[in-house]
Amino acid sequence: MNSRIEQGPFTLNTELINGMREVLKTADFNEKGILDHLSQEDSVRVNQKEFPRLLRLTAGGSPLETLIRLLVMNVPVDRPSVQRAVAPMTISSWVDTGLLRFEGEDSVHSNFRMIPSGPLRVAFDPSHKDRNQKIKPDHVHGPGPSSIRLIHATLRHDVGQVLDMGTGCGIQGLLCASHSDRVISTDVNPRALNIAAFNADLNGIGNIEFRMGSLFEPVQEEGFDLMVVNPPFAISPENRLVFRDGGMDGDGFVERIIREAPRFLNRGGFCQLNAQWAHFRGIPWEERFQNWFQSSGCDAWILKLATESPTSYATNWLNEAEKLDGDTYIKRWEDWTKYYQEKNIESVSTGFISMRKTERAEPWYRFDEDGEYLDEETNKFIHLGFHLRDFSSTASEEALLGTRFSLSDFVRLKQHSRPASDGWGVEKLVLTMTRGIHYTGNVDGRLIGLLGRCNSKRPLAELIEELADALGVEPERITESVLGIIRKLMERGYIIPDHLLAYSPKKA
Ligand SMILES: C[S@@+](CC[C@H](N)C(=O)[O-])C[C@H]1O[C@@H](n2cnc3c(N)ncnc32)[C@H](O)[C@@H]1O
C-alpha cells in the first residue's frame, strides 16, 4: 500500500483511481494504442505544430480519441464526448480526483497532461510550451530527456530497497517498483509527492512509500540496494524552480549526493544519477570528482557526454525551463552568465554517474569522455562495464595475455580517407559502439588486424606475437603499449574476454 501524500492537487481515492485505470485500459490508452492511432513512430509527446493534423486524426469522438485530446494534447473537449470516454464512470468522479475540471457549461479540460511511458501512464503539469504560459515554482515536470536518460541507464536487476530521490511525477520509482521489494520516493515538493502517489495508484503499484524532505534527510535510518536520482542539477544564481534549481552553490547539489550517498548504500548497492558539473580554469575536472569520491568506499564511473560554454548553457536552460518575455530573458541571461564569470566557470558538462559500494580497499574510478550518446539499452552495457572494469583493474599482464577476446557484435570500424597521389590515403580509422553507450574513438591502424582476429580462438599473447611479426619487432617491444590499448577497448566493451561473454548483450 502506498503511503498517502494528501497535500496536493489530487484526491487519492483508490476506488475512483482504480476505476480510471480500467477506463484508460478499455480505451487502449497506452503507448501502442496512441502511436498507432496518431501514426507516430516513437513518441507520444505531441508538438503544437502537429495540432492541426492531430485534431483531424482525433475528430471521430471515440473514447481513445477523446482521451488523447484531453490528456495528451491537453485541449478542452465537449461534455458528451468526455462522458462517453469515461463511462461507466461519471465526469464528476474524474473531476473529484483532481484530474479533470469543468470549463464553462459545455466543456471539460484536464488539469494535467498524461502520457503512457513504457508500461506506465503518468500525469504531470503541462509545460510552458503546452500552455504558453509561465510555470509555477512548484511545477512538476513530465519525463524529459534527462528522466529518459536515467530510465535507460538504471540497472534493472532484482533488488530489495530502492531510493528514488526527487521523484517529481514519480516515473523513476514507478519503474523500479517492478524489480524491487520496496521503493522510497522522496521530494521537497509536496505537490510532486501527491502527483507521484496518484500515478502509483493509477498504475496499480503498491510498494512505494512517499516521504517529504531534502536529500537524505527523510531516509536517515535506511539502506538501499539502488538509488536513482535525476537531481535539480542546473548551475545558476537562481533558486526559483524546484525541479531545476537545487538551491546550492554551483554544482553543490550533485556534490552533496555523491558525498552522502555511500553512507546509505548496502554492500554492492548502486547509486545512479544524472549530473551537470562546472569546469574551472586550471583544475582538471576529474580531480574535483576524485575529491568527492574520496573515502566513499565506492567504485565510480563517470560518463561525460557533452560540454558547453557558459553562454550556450544559460541560453539552453532559460529557454528550456520557462517562458520569459524579451527584457526578462535578457536580464536573466545576463545574471546567469555573470555568475559563471564571477565563479571562474569556463564550461559546464552533462553526464551520467554510477557508483557501487565495494568492500575492496582500493575502489576504482573511471572517467569516460568518448561516449557520445546513451540509448535505451544503456543499463545492460553499464552492467557489463562494471564487470569489465573489475577484471581490468585486477588482471595482471599475464592474465590479460592469457585471455581470449571476442569483438563485440555492436562494434563498427569506419575508415576516413582523403585523395592521395596514388589513390586514397587513410586519414583516420574510427571505432564506434552502436548500442548502449555509443563510444567513438580513433584507433591505430596497426591494431585493426589484431582486433579483427579477436574471435575467442586464441589468447591475446598469440595475437600480439603475430602483430610483432608483421611489424618486424620483438613482441616484448610492443606488449606494454598494446595491453594499455586493449584494456581501454575492453573497458568500453569493444572487445570482451571469454569469461565475461555471458554479461554481454546479444544481437536481437
Ligand atoms: C529534475 S526533477 C526529476 C523528477 C523525476 N525524478 C524525473 O526523473 O523525471 C528534480 C526533482 O527533485 C526535487 N528536488 C528539488 N530539491 C530537492 C531536494 N533538496 N531534495 C529532494 N528532492 C529535491 C524536485 O522537486 C523535482 O521533483
Image: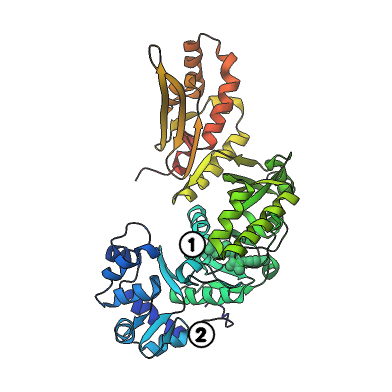
- Whether pointer 1 and pointer 2 mark residues with C-beta atoms closer than 8 Å, the reply is no
- Coloring applied to the structure: rainbow
Give me the disc on residue 203: none
Task: Give the residue displayed 48% in from the left and 16% down from the top.
Answer: 467
Q: Amino acid at mark 2?
A: Thr
Residue positioned most to the top: 472
Q: Return the residue nearer the eye: 435 or 114.
A: 114
In terms of image quarters, where does ligand 1 lie? bottom right
> Which quadrant of the view contains residue 101?
bottom left
Question: Within 10 angstroms of label 1, few (less than 14), some, or many (20 or more) residues?
Answer: some
Q: Return the residue nearer the eye: 140 or 131.
A: 131
Question: Within 10 angstroms of label 2, few (less than 14), some, or many (20 or more) residues?
Answer: many
Q: Return the residue nearer the eye: 313 or 12.
A: 313
Task: Give the residue displayed 50% in from the left and 54% down from the top.
Answer: 149
Task: Tell me which numbered mark, 1 or 2, is placed earlier along the sequence.
Answer: 2
Residue 406 lies, in percent from the top left, at: 43, 31
Q: Return the residue nearer the eye: 36 or 135.
A: 135
Q: Is residue 235 visible?
A: no
Q: Is residue 63 visible?
A: yes
- Disc 2 designates what residue? 11
> Which quadrant of the view contains residue 61?
bottom left
Ligand 1 within 8 angstroms of badge 2 C-beta = no
Image height check: is 263 above or below 89?
above
Q: Amino acid at mark 1?
A: His
Drawn side of residue 209 relative to residue 80, left or right? right
Residue 187 lies, in percent from the top left, at: 62, 70
Residue 55 lies, in percent from the top left, at: 30, 70
Task: Give the residue displayed 61% in from the left and 72% down from the top.
Answer: 137
The secondary structure type at the circle numbered 1 is helix
Give me the disc on residue 179: 1
- Mark closer to the observer (1, 2): 2
Residue positioned most to the front: 327
